[in-house]
Image (cartoon, grey):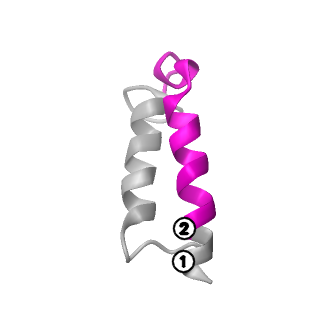
Amino acid sequence: MRRHLRNLTLPLLFALQSHTLSGLLLANKGRGTLRGDLLRLISAAASDDFNFDR
């Protein structure tokens, strides 16, 4: 199940991250842009410790 969720989630996150607007929109919390937040989320989702139930 976790593998299926990862296989669905990662391509979506990569598509969102590659969109031009993700580099222009400011992050909701902290500094940086949405692209930076998406990159951190991609890194977390790719790890074995990511909790998809959260």
Dot 2: within a 10 Å radius of its alpha carbon, few (fewer than 14), some, or many (20 or more) residues? some
3D distance between C-alphas at marks 1 and 2: 5 Å
Residue 39 on image: x %, y %: 40, 43
- Say whether residue 16 is magenta: yes
Residue tagged 2: 6
Q: Residue at x 61, y 48 (%)?
A: 12
> If the image is split into quadrants, where does the N terminus sit?
bottom right
> If the image is split into quadrants, where does the C terminus sit?
bottom right
Q: Residue at x 57, y 65 (%)?
A: 7
Which amino acid, mark 2?
Arg
Magenta stretch: helix, strand or loop mostly: helix
Q: Residue at x 53, y 55 (%)?
A: 10
Give the structural element (helix, strand or loop) at label 1: helix
Residue 5 on image: x %, y %: 61, 70
Q: From the viewer's perspective, is 51 left or right of 36?
A: right
- Say whether residue 49 is magenta: no
Whether 6 is drawn above or below 41: the answer is: below
Which residues lie in the magenta part? 6-27
Q: Residue at x 40, y 63 (%)?
A: 46
Question: In terms of depth relative to the viewer, which is nearer, 25 or 3?
Answer: 3
Question: In terms of depth relative to the viewer, which is nearer, 20 or 41?
Answer: 20
Question: In terms of depth relative to the viewer, which is nearer, 4 or 29?
Answer: 4
Residue tagged 1: 3
Give the structural element (helix, strand or loop) at label 2: helix
Cβ–Cβ below 8 Å for labels 1 and 2? yes
Which amino acid, mark 1?
Arg
Dot 1: within a 10 Å radius of its alpha carbon, few (fewer than 14), some, or many (20 or more) residues? few
Whether 9 is drawn above or below 23: the answer is: below
